[in-house]
Amino acid sequence: MTKMIDEEKIKEGVRLLLEGIGEDVNREGLKDTPDRIARMYSEIYAGYEDDAATHLSKRFHVDNNDIVLEKDIVFYSTCEHHMMPFYGKAHIAYIPNNEVVGISKLARTLEVYAKRLQIQERLTDEVCESIYKELNAKGVMVVIEAEHMCMTMRGIKKPGSKTVTVCTRGLFEEEKYKNKFFQMLSI
């Protein structure tokens, strides 16, 4: 997925938004806001210009095909419904099929998808499916727990509530592997 971020359109959109809420776009504190927001959006939505397959392409042969788990990976994303942040931790495990990737590549895969407008359910599925497909893994399990600012500072206003999503593929669809995953999380 390659989309080019158009900073000029973002700047114009921010100017219109500021005017829409009744602000003076020429006020000293707001003059540079469209530029700052455009630069920020280029950073936090960089996932549109990245491909998870690239990060998962360098692999290493292994004889041991036991579970690999990377837990407590902090991430930040943006809800596509309200364009407000949601953030939390992801736990990603896979069962290799004689090949592994560097452990940072799991976090990089999460970042590719988190740096797009998202819903948590799709984010969980995209990370899981990408790792399963690209690594030809015997199994993948992804658990994401996140707090959504659209529930914290607007609407129902329930700070501290967390949403948990789970995605499994392959061997992790079997209870014994799910149980081992959750046992490893508690270590």
Image (tube, rainbow, N blue to C red):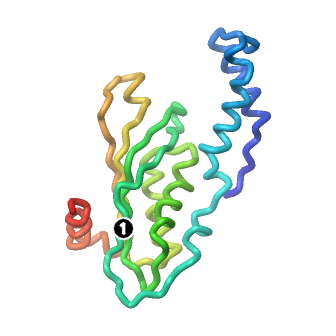
Please give the name of the residue rendered at 20% of the width and 65% of the height, measured from the top-left corner: 183
Question: Residue 166, how many percent across, how many down?
Answer: 34, 56
Q: Is residue 139 visible?
A: yes
**In the depicted view, which residue is nearer to us: 116 or 107?**
107
Residue 88 is left or right of residue 174, and the answer is right
The residue that label 1 is drawn on is 93
| Quadrant of the drawing holding the C terminus | bottom left
Question: Residue 57, how many percent across, how many down?
Answer: 58, 75
Among all residues in the image, which is located at the extreme bottom? 63
Question: Residue 43, how many percent across, how many down?
Answer: 64, 44
**In the depicted view, which residue is nearer to us: 45 or 32?**
32
Graded by Cα atoms within 10 Å as few (under 14), some (14 to 19) or many (20 or more), the crowding at tag 1 reads many
Please give the name of the residue rendered at 43% of the width and 42% of the height, measured from the top-left corner: 87
Q: Is residue 167 visible?
A: no
Count every numbered label the image shows and give the total.
1
Among all residues in the image, which is located at the extreme right? 8
Q: Secondary structure at mark 1?
A: strand
Instruction: Answer above or below: position of 115 versus 149.
Output: below
Instruction: Answer above or below: position of 78 versus 113.
Output: above
Please give the name of the residue rendered at 44% of the width and 39% of the height, measured from the top-left corner: 86
Q: Residue 26's image quarter?
A: top right
Please give the name of the residue rendered at 71% of the width and 10% of the height, measured from the top-left corner: 24
Residue 73 is left or right of residue 83, and the answer is left
Q: For the residue marked with disc 1, what is the amino acid?
A: Ala
Residue 57 is left or right of residue 185, and the answer is right
Q: Residue 98's image quarter?
A: bottom left
| Quadrant of the drawing holding the N terminus | bottom right
Instruction: Answer above or below: position of 11 versus 104.
Output: above
